[in-house]
């Protein structure tokens, strides 16, 4: 079984989706257990696989046993970077599946059989994107996950969700088509679709300056940037995530953008090679300045938002700026690059935690306004704790993972001398602090501190908080939702505490390819 | 002018057409007010890329990559798309012969035997890859066509939802309705 673990990770949710469709037609309640089953199988296979990668080094798996590079022979290749990302996807989607549980007899989107089929197909697509070592298969899997995510965004009860989904379809299709076009140019020049095959040809001296490869790189990068919502190309993201059904956004927001940042990193690392990207191309300054603009714009637009989920959407755009900029810092120890990969891991859990908290609030209040959180801590202490942990991680307070990813990114920024990037990171942290402390203030102390002059001691309980805000109309949070929230909050702390170990794993793959220390093997 | 035409336009005619088609599609996606027209633009955009890929496989004076087998075997029918790659690898597999083989090797040898023996007259005669168009881009485009159809399907379904919610498919009217509901 351990030999087959790379393919089991990808295929388990696919089969679970099939079963959910077949069994779900008769018994709707079977869908959630099947989803959980599929994801647990994926998670355990991913863990087995990761242990194997640590023991043996890179694991290569050829579908159907076609182990000669026949041009389109499908290869899955797992190293420590995508092994880690696979585990993160499995855990985050599992948390999201736990969150999706709704009591019997409700008419939520999550009670729908189709919801779980799409959920599982999306997971299969994301696992595939992460595991594949074939540039064209990457396109197909990108489309698998994108198509399902369009549907997941559109199936909510909010009418604006449909318009957001339409814009997402248009933008997403342009992004994927650009990627496909780039792969076409690469194929024209190299005659290969396997990532390693392409890298070997691209780095040959006579191909190095080829215009076709350059055009391919520009197309691929633009396509992937549209999908990651890198700042000027972010238009689809805030509405799509804000008006999607709650569970959809807890699945899409942490995973989609992060997986596409991973795709960008994989393309830099495996398709073109860091030597080509950093030494031949030498665009790092331009891209890092673009990311500075992205970070500042995302943070500042987030300040103007009054809806919680939309604000989080713009924060994601700023976080994408962190990762893209970090990956392009090109400092000598590649700390920015490794920090960007670490930030993929930590940001997945941070956004998962925040969106789950936002989802619980939405079910309680039936509206997303930040103002409606007035005095929420007393009504829902656990949810607020989750939001607190997520918010502190976003700001970057030490025991949480957000601190360490910023630490590595800033270290990369200082080493490479990109002071603009460092300043942008710090400004964005301050903006996050303003944003989240505004929420904390409203939720902990209430909106009207004038009426409660003694809010110094209302910190603890404050029984005399007589004019309590109008009791919200929605349902109380489900215990399962709270479990999901606590799990992701726990992971935020765990990833922060074990940051050294995770960075060590990332270094195992990245360091041998570092163009600044020695010439990497082609 | 004529020189420019002959050296830049004629040899790259397919590529010019694909770029123009793509721009038409993109123009429609950006400027059209009607959502269905936007989707038509999206389809044109995707089709342009298919044209680009199909152009990649073309070679001067090459024919379709189908082998005429002497022994008509069913199992070779699916081998056509792989054949082109076997040709490229011919030299490395020349040594593989009959004997005690593993399953994979036997399959390999079997396919190669299929490569060598049929094709017209001479058995064992090496196939010249320049005689055949490259089938791989076409095979890739089969997948891309399927993806395009699926995207269009999802997009039309979303349009249907939008029509149900807003009663119109004109973007400007939808936006006014959203603005009104925000203020109201």
Image (cartoon, helix red, strand yellow):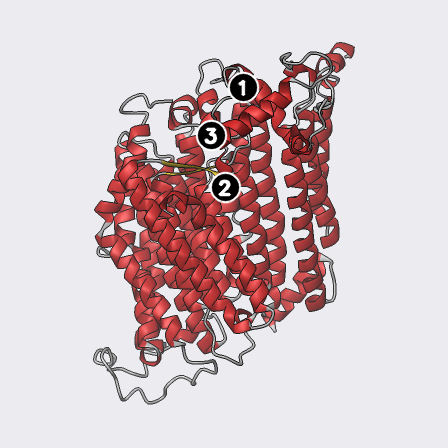
Query: Residue B72 appears at what percent x and percent y?
Result: 72, 28
- Which one is nearer the viewer's eye here, A452 or A63? A63
The correct choice, above or below, for A451 with respect to A164 in the image is below
Which residue is outermost to the right? B2
Q: Is residue A70 visible?
A: no
Identify the residue under disc 3.
B102
Identify the residue under disc 2.
A225
Q: Residue at x 69, y 19 (%)?
A: B118
Q: Residues within 10 Å of mark 3 (few under 14, many from 20)?
A: few
Task: Give how far apart the Cα atoms at labels 3 and 2 are.
Answer: 46 Å
Cβ atoms under marks 1 and 3 closer than 8 Å? no
1 vs 3, front mark:
3
Identify the residue under disc 1.
B89
Q: Secondary structure at mark 2?
A: helix
- Which one is nearer the viewer's eye here, A414 or B109? B109
3 vs 2, front mark:
3
Query: Residue A318 appears at what percent x and percent y?
Result: 41, 50
The correct choice, above or below, for A210 with respect to A411 in the image is above
Which residue is outermost to the front? B99
Chain identity of mark 2: A
Task: Give how far apart the Cα atoms at labels 1 and 2 are.
Answer: 37 Å
Query: Residue A459 appears at what percent x and percent y?
Result: 24, 77
1 vs 2, front mark:
1
Task: Give how far apart the Cα atoms at labels 1 and 3 are.
Answer: 19 Å
User: Where does the N terminus of chain B fall, quadrant-wise?
Assistant: top right
- Which one is nearer the viewer's eye here, A4 or A265? A4
Q: Residue at x 27, y 29 (%)?
A: A332
Q: Residue A385 got which mark?
A: none
Chain identity of mark 1: B
Count of numbered labels shown in the rendering: 3
Q: Residues within 10 Å of mark 2 (few under 14, many from 20)?
A: many
Displayed quadrant of residue A179:
top right
């Amino acid at each position: 079984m351990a030999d087959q673990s790379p393919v089991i990770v990808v295929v388990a949710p696919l089969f679970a989706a099939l079963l959910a469709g077949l069994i779900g037609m008769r018994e709707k309640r079977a869908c959630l257990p099947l989803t959980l089953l599929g994801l647990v199988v994926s998670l355990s296979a991913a863990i087995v696989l990761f242990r194997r990668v640590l023991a043996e080094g890179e694991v290569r798996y050829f579908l159907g046993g076609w182990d000669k590079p026949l041009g389109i022979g499908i290869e899955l290749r797992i190293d420590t970077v995508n092994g880690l990302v696979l585990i993160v996807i499995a855990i985050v989607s599992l948390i999201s599946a736990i969150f999706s549980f709704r009591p019997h007899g409700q008419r939520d989107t999550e009670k729908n059989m189709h919801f779980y089929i799409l959920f599982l197909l999306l997971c299969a697509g994301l696992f595939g994107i992460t595991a594949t070592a074939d540039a064209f298969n990457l396109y197909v899997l990108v489309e698998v996950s994108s198509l399902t995510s369009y549907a997941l965004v559109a199936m909510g009860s909010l009418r604006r969700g449909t318009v957001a989904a339409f814009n997402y379809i248009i933008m997403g299709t342009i992004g994927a088509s650009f990627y496909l076009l780039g792969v076409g140019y690469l194929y024209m020049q190299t005659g290969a679709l396997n990532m390693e095959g392409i890298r070997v040809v691209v780095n040959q001296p006579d191909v190095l300056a080829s215009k076709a490869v350059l055009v391919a790189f520009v197309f691929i990068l633009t396509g992937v940037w549209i999908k990651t919502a890198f700042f000027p190309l972010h238009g689809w993201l805030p509405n799509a995530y804000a008006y999607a059904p709650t569970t959809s956004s807890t699945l899409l927001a942490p995973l989609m953008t992060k997986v596409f940042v991973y795709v960008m990193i994989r393309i830099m690392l495996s398709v073109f090679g860091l030597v080509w990207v950093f030494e031949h191309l030498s665009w790092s300054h331009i891209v890092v300045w673009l990311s500075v603009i992205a970070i500042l714009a995302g943070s500042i637009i987030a300040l103007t938002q009054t809806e919680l989920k939309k604000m989080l959407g713009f924060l994601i755009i700023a976080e994408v700026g962190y990762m893209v900029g970090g990956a392009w810092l090109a400092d000598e120890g590649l700390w920015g690059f490794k920090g960007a990969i670490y930030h993929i891991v930590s940001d997945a859990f941070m956004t998962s935690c925040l969106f789950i908290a936002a989802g619980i609030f939405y079910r309680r209040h039936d509206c997303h306004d930040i103002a409606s959180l007035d005095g929420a801590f007393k009504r829902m202490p656990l949810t607020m704790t989750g939001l607190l942990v997520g918010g502190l991680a976003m700001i970057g307070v030490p025991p949480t993972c957000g601190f360490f990813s910023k630490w590595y990114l800033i270290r990369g920024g200082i080493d490479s001398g990109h002071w603009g990037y460092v300043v942008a990171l710090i400004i964005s942290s301050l903006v996050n602090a303003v944003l989240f402390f505004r929420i904390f203030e409203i939720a902990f102390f209430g909106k009207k501190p004038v009426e409660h002059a003694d809010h110094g001691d209302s910190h603890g309980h404050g029984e005399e908080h007589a004019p309590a805000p109008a009791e919200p109309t929605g349902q109380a949070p489900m215990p399962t939702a709270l479990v999901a929230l606590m799990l992701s909050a726990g992971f935020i702390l765990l990833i922060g505490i074990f940051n050294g170990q995770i960075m060590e794993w990332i270094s195992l793959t990245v360091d041998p390819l570092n163009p600044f220390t020695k010439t990497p093997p082609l | 002018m004529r020189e420019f035409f002959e050296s830049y336009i004629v040899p790259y005619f397919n590529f010019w057409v694909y770029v123009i088609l793509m721009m038409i599609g993109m123009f429609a996606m950006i400027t059209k007010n009607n959502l269905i027209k936007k989707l038509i633009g999206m389809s044109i955009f995707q089709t342009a890329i298919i044209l680009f890929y199909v152009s990649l496989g073309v070679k001067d004076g090459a024919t379709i990559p189908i082998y005429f087998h002497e022994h008509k075997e069913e199992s070779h029918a699916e081998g056509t798309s792989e054949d082109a790659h076997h040709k490229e690898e011919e030299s490395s597999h020349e040594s593989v012969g009959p004997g005690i083989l593993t399953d994979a090797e036997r399959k390999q040898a079997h396919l190669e035997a299929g490569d060598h023996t049929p094709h017209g007259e001479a058995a064992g005669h090496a196939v010249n890859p320049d005689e055949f168009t490259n089938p791989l881009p076409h095979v890739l485009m089969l997948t891309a066509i399927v993806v395009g159809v699926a995207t269009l399907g999802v997009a039309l379904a979303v349009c249907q939802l939008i029509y149900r919610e807003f009663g119109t498919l004109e973007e400007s009217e939808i936006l006014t309705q959203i603005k009104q509901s925000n203020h109201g």
